[in-house]
Image (cartoon, grey):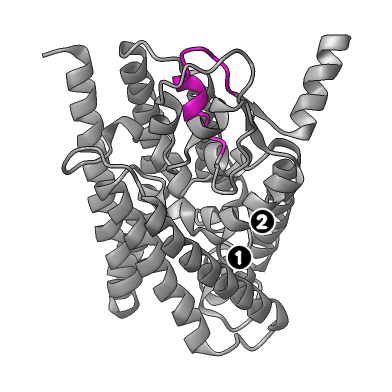
Amino acid sequence: MSAVSWELRLLKALLWTYIVLCLVIASLNWGYLPSATAKVAKAITGLWHFYENWFKSVLIVVCGWLTLRIIHKKKQRTTMRKGNLIGFCLAALLVHIILPLLLKNPELYYFAMPLPWSTVPLQAGVEGTAMHSSLTGSIALSGIRSSLLFFWIYSATILVGTVLFGRRVQCSTLCLFNGFASEVFAPAFPLVGAFKTPLLPGRLALVAVIRKLFFVMALALTLYWTLFKTGGGHPSIAKLETVKYLIFELLMAMFFWVAFVGRLYCYYCPLGTLLGWLGRVGGQRIATNQTHCIQCGKCTAACPLSIDVRSYAMHGLPMEDLSCVGCGHCIDACPTETLKYRTRFIYFLYEARRNH
């Protein structure tokens, strides 16, 4: 059995483990916990915190290493993907281990979800909500304030960083929801069946409609929780977002990881939609004229978002698709190295260094 074979088998096994544990522990945390005894509830909460923080962090490091080994064995470049994996490892270390210990908040990962992806951080700041009551009992008001400060600083960093460096900052370097899984488990997709193109053009039109609906819903929820400062708002609104998260984000994302290639949630992620527009403002693109295109199609085949990069490279035109997450898979796959990730700011830094 070759080295790649055992590495790939282990990676697939770890992906299965991650998915099963996620669904089981999420069911316990969101379903059974409210009716459990105090002792059982404490055990479930401790298990959830361990899984979300320590287990996930170790998983990112181990699976990132396995993925790089598999890619190296195939004699493919790993420049962009290595940067992605290093970013996710550092993000996990900071968000899941270092800062939770410093701020004494094991649920800090909730505050690493910039608007409009989730309004959980906003709910934590609203008196009367379940999130506020839960955190007040575990980390007190001072802990909530410090966590909210982290949330706003983190969100501002993501927004400004996207304008300067493109959608790659969040979606392919820092996202500890779908982004990290799609990168560290990339060679393991799909777990069942053979590789399939993520979405055909006809289905992309349907996903575009879903993306708009999710974005509008996310903005409505953001506005709602921004208006409520006390009283907790209507309980059904919080339940609505919980259902949205469990079914359309957690469960559907897990299904996509199993059935396809890991990035399908990125098509309709409300934060990704906003960052796509901000990336356009900052001039995010894949330059396709660095050398010459031989029309091998490896760039298009490598793209987890089904973007036809080759059609742009054929004419030397920059690829500026709003769905591009800046993962750089196409860049690493190109045998002639004619592709380059760019934003206006990155190009400015490049020119300044070249002329220095």
Density class for disc 2 (Cα within 10 Å; few <14, some 14-19, many ≥20) is many
SS for dot 2: helix
Classify 150 as above or below 172: below
Classify 62 as above or below 123: above
Q: Which mark is residue 63?
A: none
**Location of the N terminus (image quadrant):** top left
Which residue position holds label 2? 151
In magenta segment, residue 257: no
Nearer to the camera, 341 or 7: 341
Q: Is residue 33 visible?
A: yes
Residues under labels 1 and 2: Cα distance? 7 Å
| Residue at point 40%, 75% (across, down) | 243
314 on left or right of 66: right
Density class for disc 1 (Cα within 10 Å; few <14, some 14-19, many ≥20) is many
Give the magenta range.
326-339
In magenta segment, residue 334: yes
Q: Position of residue 69 (x, y in %)?
A: 34, 17
